[in-house]
Every structure is written in structure tokens, then in C-alpha cells.
């Protein structure tokens, strides 16, 4: 029996849809013409708290006990998961604590606090600090990616893509810890095994690529990238299993390629997205993937939480 059952994603859809924004899929005139594809953009950048992360968090919170809810939850994040957890937990009257790196975006820290999260900034290993805080305060971990219920929540995006674009042939997804690509790829491959799923990592934070080579979850000692939404310092056992089964290829893009693609998106699509979202476009613009012309391609715009100081310098 397969470890994945699409029924769990259908259950997640029922669990979370009333809380979500229904994010659109648009066709990109500029990039379709530039690349000679039919290129579509799934705008999770319009999701609540500015990223797809609320889907997995909302679904996971449905599966913790009343005692766990009363004690509170904890996690680790560079920003998007932090904001999603703070908001979703507050909606359910649950106290949340999030471990964030001391280098985290000031905007993401501010937003996480606004949504009700208690933040602990650290220069230490975030996972170790998270485990320490969890044990000390008897909190429940809401993992940013390596959790089946989180993956099922992210998988609801796959249902939406297939419902809107049954003709889709290639789906390009940014990869951090792998929760997003695990959820989407497992759904789309189940509905149509011919769909090609391509993951994109920053070359400066390529923990999944390294893990696929070694065939085990790897850790990075350094992973500084402008695409902080993809800056996972380690891979997960669960997500690595999904990626090995459902993802066709993972490619890497340079920092300059992400930055230049982000400028193109803002200028030509009039969309404010974060560098993590631009990584998917960079993989196409800089020929990291061989895709036949006239193909039907979709890029996942995973978030819009761009740091305002970075945006000023970019423009």
C-alpha cells in the first residue's frame, strides 16, 4: 500500500477551506511570450498571511488534542510559517511560540508578533532551540514541513491546480524543506502521472539536492539566500520520501538569477512576490529545465512577504 492517499487531502480541503482565500491562477502574457510556453501562475502570494503556509498549519491544528491546545504550540521558521502559525493559532485561541533566526526579516518578525506569536530569536541551531523550548514548556511541535497533516494541507493547492488546468504538463515549485512540493506533487501525480513536477532550490540553500544525492536527510551549516522562504537548514525524513517518489527533478538557481527574475515579475506582471516565488521563474528564464515549446507550464507563486528594505534596494 502506498504511503500517500489522496483522500487525506480531500479531508484537509473540507477542514480548512472556509478559512482560506481562494487564490487565482492567471496566464502570464509576458513570460508566455518570452519563453514560448503557455505559462500560468498560481498566486498563493494572495493567501492569508501572504503565503501558502496557512493551509498546512490550519490542517495540522485540527489534529492536536484539547490538552495540547491548552498548553500551546511551538515551531521554527524564517518567517512565512511563523506568520501562518501565529495567525492560525490565534484564530483558535492557542498560544504560539516560534523560534526565528536572528537574521530574519524585520517585516516578518513584526507581522508574526502582530498575528499573536511569541518570538524567540536565536543565533543557535533553530531545531535544537525549538526542541529545548518545547520540552521545557510542554508545547506541541507544529513542524514547518515534515509532517503528514501539514503536507495534506499544502496538497489542497494541487487539487485547485488540477481543477482549473487539467491540461497542465509541467508544474514548477520552489523547495525549502519540501512540504509544499510534497503536497502538490503527490496530488497531481495521483490524478495524472504524466504531469512533470520540477523543484527549484537556491544554490545557496540546496539541502534537498544534497539529500537526494546522499539518499538521507542532510543539514546545512550555512544557507544564506535572498529567498529566505526556501532557506530550510535541514531536510525531513517524510518530505524526502515524497520527493523521491513524486518529483521528477530538482534544479538550483543562483542568487543573481532569482533577483533578476523577481525584477521581471514586478515590472512586467505587476505582482509583488518574494524571492522564493521568483525562483520558479528563474529556473525557466535561465534554462535550468528542458521543456518543449508550447507546453502548458505552471509556476507556483508561493508568497508575497518581501522585506520592504530589500524591495527598496531592488527597485
Image (cartoon, rainbow, N blue to C red):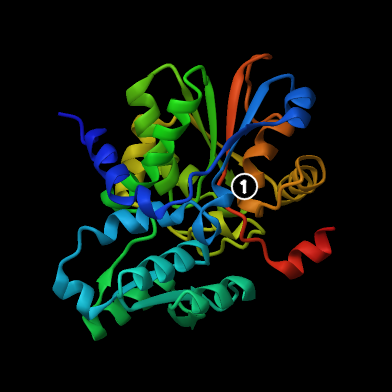
> Left or right of 29: which side holds 116?
left
Which residue is pictured at 37% across the width and 73% down the height?
90
Residue placed furthest toward the front: 18
- 278 or 286: nearer the eye? 278
Q: Position of residue 273 (x, y in %)?
A: 66, 52
Which residue is pictured at 58% across the width and 72% down the height?
104
Q: Residues within 10 Å of mark 1 (few under 14, many from 20)?
A: many
Q: Position of residue 165 (x, y in %)?
A: 51, 23
> Left or right of 308: which side holds 195?
left
Q: Secondary structure at mark 1?
A: helix
Placement of the C terminus among the 4 image quadrants: bottom right
Q: Is residue 270 above or below residue 70?
A: above
Q: Which residue is mark 1?
A: 277
Total count of labels: 1
Q: Position of residue 170 (x, y in %)?
A: 54, 24
Q: Is residue 201 above or below residue 307?
A: above
On the image, which quarter does residue 158 sit in? top left
Residue placed furthest toward the bottom: 136
On the image, which quarter does residue 64 sit in? bottom left
Q: Can the viewer see residue 105?
A: no
Placement of the N terminus among the 4 image quadrants: top left
Q: Can the viewer see residue 298?
A: yes
Q: Is residue 308 above or below residue 298?
A: below
> Left or right of 198: which side holds 235?
left
Q: Position of residue 266 (x, y in %)?
A: 77, 48
Amino acid at each position: 500500500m502506498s504511503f500517500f492517499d489522496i483522500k487525506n487531502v480531500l479531508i484537509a480541503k473540507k477542514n480548512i477551506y472556509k478559512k482560506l482565500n481562494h487564490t487565482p491562477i492567471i496566464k502570464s502574457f509576458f513570460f508566455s511570450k518570452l519563453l514560448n510556453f503557455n505559462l500560468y501562475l498560481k498566486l498563493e502570494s494572495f493567501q492569508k498571511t501572504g503565503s501558502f503556509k496557512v493551509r498546512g498549519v490550519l490542517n495540522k491544528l485540527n489534529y492536536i488534542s484539547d490538552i495540547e491546545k491548552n498548553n500551546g504550540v511551538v515551531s521554527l521558521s524564517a518567517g512565512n510559517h511563523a506568520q501562518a502559525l501565529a495567525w492560525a493559532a490565534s484564530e483558535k485561541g492557542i498560544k504560539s511560540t516560534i523560534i526565528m533566526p536572528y537574521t530574519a526579516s524585520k517585516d516578518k518578525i513584526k507581522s508574526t508578533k502582530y498575528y499573536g506569536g511569541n518570538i524567540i530569536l536565536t543565533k543557535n541551531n533553530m531545531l535544537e532551540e525549538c526542541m529545548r523550548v518545547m520540552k521545557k514548556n510542554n508545547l506541541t511541535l507544529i513542524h514547518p514541513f515534515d509532517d503528514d497533516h501539514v503536507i495534506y494541507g499544502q496538497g489542497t493547492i494541487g487539487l485547485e491546480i488540477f481543477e482549473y488546468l487539467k491540461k497542465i504538463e509541467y508544474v514548477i515549485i520552489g523547495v525549502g524543506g519540501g512540504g509544499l512540493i510534497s503536497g502538490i506533487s503527490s496530488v497531481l501525480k495521483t490524478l495524472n502521472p504524466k504531469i512533470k513536477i520540477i523543484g527549484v532550490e537556491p544554490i545557496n540553500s540546496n539541502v534537498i539536492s544534497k539529500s537526494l544525492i546522499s539518499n538521507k536527510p542532510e543539514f546545512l551549516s550555512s544557507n544564506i539566500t535572498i529567498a529566505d522562504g526556501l532557506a530550510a537548514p535541514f531536510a525531513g525524513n517524510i518530505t524526502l520520501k515524497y520527493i523521491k517518489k513524486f518529483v521528477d527533478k530538482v534544479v538550483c538557481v543562483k542568487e543573481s538569477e532569482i533577483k533578476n527574475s523577481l525584477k521581471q515579475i514586478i515590472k512586467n506582471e505587476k505582482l509583488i512576490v518574494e524571492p522564493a516565488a521568483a525562483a520558479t521563474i528563474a529556473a525557466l528564464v535561465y534554462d535550468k529545465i528542458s521543456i518543449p515549446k508550447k507546453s502548458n507550464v505552471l509556476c507556483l507563486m508561493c508568497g508575497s512577504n518581501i522585506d520592504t528594505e530589500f524591495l527598496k534596494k531592488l527597485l
